[in-house]
Image (spheres, rainbow, N blue to C red):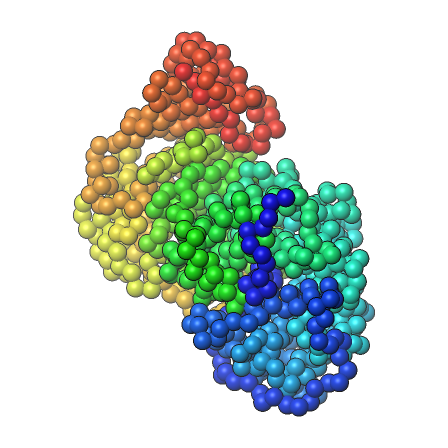
């Protein structure tokens, strides 16, 4: 068996996902109580015994939280320590330590509410971390230790014990509270009386007895991130209880030994929650969740692998290689310079304390932790990729987002001259199993959030994502290396949620999505959502829009090239008496931005509140972003500059994620196309040129290197003579530019030298066989997938067996 990349270092192991201590800086007075000589004499554990496998693992668990020994004079460590101290000082100052208390903090009442006691445990974990961290202001304080033991006892007696019954959100009872409680027990294990520890473990045993089942619904098997979380909880419980069978149960929960691997985390799935072979990750059955639940799953598995390495309970399942493959195929494509793309973060986009850079940092931490124990053949590549992410992100630097353990591992990587930072990955990715498309070029990336009757247009609930109405209706996220704060700098509370870039919308007013307990999703009725990829470089994507609560229907395509994205819309029809719009761009200009907007060579005003209408517009350019070409005659472009103010609380009122009521203001430049009131068979066409200059945009508009051959309800097809590329969406059986498809299809065809490359997909996932007739002679088949048969000749026909392929691409090389 191949050896790990490097021996596990206790100091440099870091926790990830729920295990990571990413400490926010909380405004408030700093300070610490004076150490008091009032230590309890009855303890649950004494000095560490190196021969005791339980204590060895618990020591490792402690160092995963605190970082162990480190150089507090190092500026990066000093910053992380200062962040910890600031949070802990605020919590310590406001902690109610009186005998008559009814809660621990006045803002977490009533303490019997699941969200309130769960968050109280989380704050106690921060205090316990500060107490156990060398060099922290509260480090080693007897007063703090005694107060923490007393506070844990108070929560047990008042809110969370084996005699309570679950109410409200199950997650607080079965994951949130027990995980934070067990971390506290790990850190305070030499100070907690044995009776108290036993009582806490009884509480955990009541609500999280194993990783396999949902306690409040025992017939429901845990899957994905929830199983990963519970495996960590059961492992820590087993270590504290010195119960070898329980620790083994936790380890085996990753592989789902109990149910013969049915819900193993170390497998690819074809339905439901988990990792898919195409790189997709699904949680809650229908939600694209790589950047939230997927990161938690990866972090939990990496944490247990590190925690139990070298112990009698080491993770040895060879199928952990699925996790290794996920780093490259699932996570890397959706991380841009350390940012996690919002298209795969679900309702987490509404969380003020979980921006794209924060969730990106959690994923980076999980990858680094997994790399510390993975074979060098896979880990070396990850480390180079991560080094590139960290070095390029100077907007929200990784070292300023994470805790001491993560800083230690990252600094080791950055100082390792044998690791060369990798450039940005390029290529086109169709995640057909989660209706997401990601197009990556050296200087920019674009992701598309699509939806269908298979994949939710949005998830909302537990008070979160109250304005997520259109986030899955073809929203196009443009990332550039020059503006890494585009979506992480106050975007979600300030952007007009009715004008998300890339979407076609009914302008009706919408009520906030549900604020009640539990989560819900909206699945539209359309089938087509997905696309094809050719040579890992070019893409054709499509979505049939069936708007929620509206008669609006539209057929939308995107063709993604080396330096351009061609967006077409057709069949845009509605009958509700309201205006329909297609949003070309809605760019966050941050607090004071005034980039030049040029339309057809004329500079437009830069003041806030300006708007304009440009009939017959041929092109536009926004400094710092790129160009927009409108190849259709008669395009009426509308533009707006505005300053918008919102609050995170407008989007999120969740019990443990609620946004602040502080006003946030940002400037925006918006471009859109107005299709009028109740349009019939309207259309649009525009070309996005990321990073292009105004001069280059004008040239593109004049020379028209892209030819739009068809843009109607039957087919949308474009040709690029320079590259020999033809890209098409067929919405039904039909012919365009000599290509004839038997049904809905995404098609890419490129002529090169004396041959042709063809890529075809069924974006509706509903056909059994698809045929494609080509408009040129084919003499022989150089290569074809097993699912593709070719009848050569003057009018060759490809027959593609698409049944069961779930929208994935089929390819052939012809001559």
Residue shown at 38%/50% (left/top)?
Answer: 479
Rendered image quadrant of residue 482: bottom left
Lateral position of residue 313 relative to residue 65, left or right: right
In the picture, measured across the screen, residue 532 lies left or right of residue 302, that is left
Residue located farthest toward the left when viewing the structure as drawn: 602
Rendered location of residue 705, percent (x, y): 27, 31
Q: Which x, y percent locates residue 35?
A: 61, 88
Asked whether the viewer can see residue 204, the reply is: no
Q: Position of residue 358 (x, y in %)?
A: 49, 60
Question: Looking at the image, which is closer to me, 137 or 217?
Answer: 137
- At x 22%, y 32%, the residue is 703
Which residue is rendered at x = 63% and y = 37% of the image? 270
For the N terminus, the quadrant is: top right
Q: Looking at the picture, how far across and down is residue 779, in whole percent?
A: 42, 11
Q: Is residue 446 above or below residue 368?
A: above
Taking the image as shown, residue 205 lies to the left or right of residue 636, namely right
What number of labels is visible? 0
Q: Is residue 124 visible?
A: yes
Q: Nearer the viewer, residue 61 or 282?
A: 61
Residue lying farthest to the top in this orientation: 793
The relative height of residue 629 versus residue 181 in the rendered view (above or below) is above
Name the one closer to the observer, 129 or 791. Answer: 129
Which residue is pictured at 59% across the width and 23% down the height? 768
Considering the image in quadrants, where does the C terminus appear?
A: top left
């Amino acid at each position: 068996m191949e050896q790990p990349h490097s021996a596990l270092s206790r100091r440099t192991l870091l926790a990830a996902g729920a295990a990571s201590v990413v400490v926010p800086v909380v405004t408030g007075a700093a300070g610490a109580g004076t150490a008091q000589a009032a230590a309890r004499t009855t303890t649950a554990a004494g000095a560490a015994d190196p021969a005791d496998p339980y204590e060895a693992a618990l020591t490792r668990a402690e160092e995963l939280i605190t970082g162990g020994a480190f150089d507090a004079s190092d500026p990066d460590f000093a910053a992380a320590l200062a962040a910890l101290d600031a949070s802990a000082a605020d919590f310590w100052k406001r902690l109610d330590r009186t005998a008559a208390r009814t809660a621990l903090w006045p803002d977490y009442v009533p303490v019997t509410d699941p969200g309130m006691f769960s968050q109280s445990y989380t704050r106690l974990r921060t205090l316990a971390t500060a107490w156990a961290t060398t060099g922290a202001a509260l480090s080693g304080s007897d007063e703090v230790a005694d107060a923490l033991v007393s506070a844990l006892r108070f929560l047990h007696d008042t809110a969370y014990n084996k005699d309570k019954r679950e109410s409200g959100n199950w997650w607080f009872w079965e994951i949130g509270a027990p995980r934070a409680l067990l971390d506290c027990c790990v850190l305070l294990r030499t100070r907690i009386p044995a009776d108290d520890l036993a009582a806490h473990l009884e509480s955990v045993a009541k609500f999280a007895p194993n990783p396999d089942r949902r306690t409040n619904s025992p017939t429901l098997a845990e899957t994905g991130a929830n199983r990963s979380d519970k495996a960590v909880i059961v492992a820590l419980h087993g270590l504290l209880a010195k119960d070898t069978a329980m620790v083994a149960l936790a380890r085996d929960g990753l592989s789902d030994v109990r149910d013969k691997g049915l819900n193993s985390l170390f497998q690819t799935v074809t339905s439901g929650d988990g990792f898919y072979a195409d790189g997709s990750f699904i949680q809650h059955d229908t939600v694209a969740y790589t950047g939230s639940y997927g990161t938690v799953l990866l972090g939990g598995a990496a944490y247990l692998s590190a925690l139990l390495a070298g112990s009698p309970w080491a993770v040895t399942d060879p199928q952990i290689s699925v996790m290794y493959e996920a780093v490259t195929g699932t996570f890397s494509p959706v991380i841009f310079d350390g940012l996690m793309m919002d298209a795969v973060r679900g309702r987490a986009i509404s969380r003020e304390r979980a921006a794209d850079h924060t969730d990106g940092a959690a994923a980076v931490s999980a990858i680094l932790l997994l790399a510390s124990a993975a074979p060098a053949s896979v880990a070396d590549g990850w480390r180079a990729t991560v080094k590139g992410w960290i070095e390029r992100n100077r907007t929200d630097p990784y070292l300023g987002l994470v805790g001491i353990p993560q800083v230690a591992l990252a600094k080791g990587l950055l100082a390792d001259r044998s690791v060369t930072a990798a450039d940005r990955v390029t290529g086109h990715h169709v995640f057909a199993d989660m209706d997401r498309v990601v197009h990556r070029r050296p200087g920019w990336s674009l992701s598309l959030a699509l939806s269908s009757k298979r994949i939710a247009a949005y998830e909302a609930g537990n008070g979160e994502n109250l304005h997520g109405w259109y986030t899955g209706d073809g929203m196009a996220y443009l990332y550039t290396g020059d503006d890494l704060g585009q979506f992480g700098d106050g975007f979600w509370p300030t952007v007009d949620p009715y004008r998300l870039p890339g979407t076609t919308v009914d302008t009706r007013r919408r009520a906030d999505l549900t604020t009640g307990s539990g989560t819900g999703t909206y699945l539209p009725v359309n089938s087509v959502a997905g696309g094809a990829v050719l040579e890992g470089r070019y893409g054709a994507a499509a979505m049939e829009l069936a708007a929620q609560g509206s008669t609006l229907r539209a057929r939308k395509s995107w063709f993604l090239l080396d330096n351009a994205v061609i967006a077409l819309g057709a069949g845009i029809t509605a009958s509700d008496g309201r205006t329909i719009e297609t949003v070309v761009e809605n760019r966050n200009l941050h607090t004071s931005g005034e980039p030049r907007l040029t339309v057809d060579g004329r500079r437009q005003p830069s003041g806030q509140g300006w708007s304009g209408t440009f009939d017959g517009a041929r092109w536009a350019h926004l400094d710092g972003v790129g160009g927009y070409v409108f190849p259709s005659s008669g395009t009426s472009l509308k533009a707006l500059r505005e300053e918008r103010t919102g609050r995170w609380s407008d989007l999120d009122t969740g019990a443990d994620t609620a946004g602040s009521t502080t006003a946030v203001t940002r400037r925006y430049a918006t471009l859109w196309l107005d299709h009028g009131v109740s349009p019939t068979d309207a259309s649009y066409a525009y070309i996005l040129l990321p990073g292009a200059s105004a001069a280059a945009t004008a040239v593109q508009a004049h020379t028209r290197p892209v030819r739009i051959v068809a843009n109607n309800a039957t087919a949308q097809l474009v040709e690029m003579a320079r590259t020999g590329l033809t890209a098409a969406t067929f919405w039904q059986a039909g012919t365009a530019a000599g290509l004839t498809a038997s049904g809905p299809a995404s098609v890419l065809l490129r002529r090169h030298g004396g041959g042709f490359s063809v890529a075809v997909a069924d974006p509706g996932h509903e056909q059994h066989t698809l045929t494609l007739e080509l408009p040129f002679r084919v003499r022989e088949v150089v290569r074809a997938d097993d699912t593709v048969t070719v009848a050569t000749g003057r009018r060759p026909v490809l027959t593609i067996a698409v049944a069961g392929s779930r929208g994935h691409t089929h390819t052939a090389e012809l001559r």
